[in-house]
Amino acid sequence: MSAYIVLGAQWGDEGKGKMTDYLAEDADVVVRFQGGNNAGHTVVVGEKEYKLHLIPSGILYNNKLNVIGNGVVLDPKALFEEIEYLEGLGVSITPDNLVISDRCHIIMPYHRVLDGIKEKVRGKKDIGTTGKGIGPCYTDKMERSGIRACNLINKEVFKENLKEALEVKNPIITKVFGGEALDFDKVYEEYCGYAERMKPFVKDISVIVNKKIKEGKEVLFEGAQGTLLDIDYGTYPYVTSSNTIAGGVCTGAGVGPTAITNGVGIAKAYTTRVGKGPFPTELFDDMGDWIREKGHEFGVTTGRARRCGWLDLCILKTSSRISGLTSFAVTKIDTLAGLDKIKICVGYKLKGEVIDYVPASLEDLGECEPIFEEFDGWDESIADARSYEELPENAKKYLKKIEEFTETKVSIASVGPKRNQTIKISDI
Ligand code: GDP
Ligand code: IMO
Ligand code: MG
């Protein structure tokens, strides 16, 4: 029996899609447990590149069950756009290989509108959200006024829910923010259309996932975003609105902690972040631009340029602790190839002390002065390495440093975006 988590150990975009696809070869079930279509997971199979936002990365195999858990916020419009996009690439999606939790909260048009308006109102203090309505949808969930998949597929219940929602949202949109009211009939008709199409996919996923675990099937929980975007442990308020850490699996997929056997943190060999918020090892010079260009660091969901900086081991150590990670998969080692010297942050100087964790207060994190250790670089040939032995000695030293500092082994090294550009160092 094995049920394990693949999650982002930094600020998202670590290569979770690639690693989920790689690990899913042996899995029976792939489950998304949080987030929504704010995620952008890239998977490269052969010469084809797939960009997934909402649908689990196991969908590219034809023999896996893919599950959208109750912790996900689901935009039906985005779902069907993604299904059509994938079908156009030859991927078949049916209720046999995709199930959606009946408890999923639905992203409605007013959530997207409010996401945009609230960002504008925040002005200089904007979060830099993806604009997909994620925060407003989770707000309604917690406030107990959300619409769930099981409500959406019941026409009468949905009618009632939508009426109640618009009675509250329209005055906020028009009177508070000066926006345009949403028309009940238009939204109702559009969403009833989605509901009809969604119905066959909507099930109690906790029942399904736990049955699979009991049968001894391998279940992979695919995280979205990353540890420092977590609503509790991230760089609040510059975070997303869900629990991206291991704890999110239990609430977001209806499984107990005892079912989970291990956790793999996906860590990029350097650090990136999209959107606003503190970033201690950020590079503002040519080196940052060099990494961005070489690593093609532009967002999958919004196309925004990602901020780039050196690897920060305080972040990885924090991530390992919070999620009880059993190993790391380090991606994009090939991107750093060709550099003479590479820096790693091994501590923060804060108010005369040295710490090795990410503090809660943004003011403290902003004051943290990274302590760097310098490493010798490695050459360009690394993308063809297929075993640990083939990695340059300096790359091995880099990985060893990650293991020592975080007290967590590195089980996988990734040297390119393709499935086969992956080196298994040890079992996850
Ligand atoms: P995710 O959100 O964590 O799934 O990551 P993204 O897909 O947003 O961003 C990761 C990017 O890096 C994608 O374009 C991947 O194809 C690519 N990628 C993943 N692993 C590697 C790697 O080891 N080397 C290189 N060069 N690219 C990689
Ligand atoms: P994947 O799964 C990187 C960031 C946004 C913004 C903040 C809040 O591809 O790693 P939101 O729309 O969630 O309210 O935005 O979170 N963000 C991500 N950054 N990768 C992601 O997903 C992200 N999803 C959200 O840029 O700073
Ligand atoms: Mg991404």
Image (tube, grey):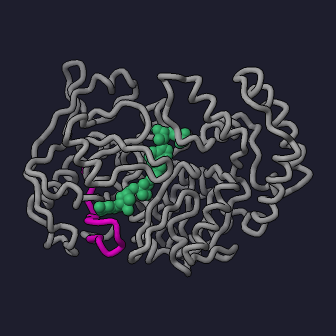
Q: Is residue 198 visible?
A: yes
User: Position of 21 compared to 77: left or right?
Assistant: left
Number of numbered discs on residues:
0
Residue 349 placement (x, y as % from top left):
20, 26
The residue that appears at 22% across and 75% down in the rendered structure is 386
User: Position of 129 compared to 42: left or right?
Assistant: right
Q: Which of 178 and 233 is in front in this view?
A: 178
Is 170 situated above or below 19? above
Q: Quadrant of residue 15?
A: bottom left
Residue 419 placement (x, y as % from top left):
36, 73
Q: Is residue 395 on the magenta stretch?
A: no
Is 24 situated above or below 337? below
Q: Which of 157 and 116 is in front in this view?
A: 116
The residue that appears at 43% across and 73% down in the rendered structure is 48
The residue that appears at 51% across and 59% down in the rendered structure is 258
Residue 308 placement (x, y as % from top left):
29, 42
Give the farthest residue toward the top.
351
The residue that appears at 11% across and 65% down in the rendered structure is 392
Give the farthest residue toward the right.
156
Residue 401 placement (x, y as % from top left):
16, 51
- For the C terminus, the image quarter is bottom left
Give the farthest residue toward the bottom.
63
Q: In which quarter of the image is residue 164?
A: top right
Is 109 situated above or below 25? above
Q: Which of 352 and 53 is in front in this view?
A: 53
User: Position of 97 compared to 310: left or right?
Assistant: right
Magenta region: which residues?
407-423
Q: Is residue 323 visible?
A: no
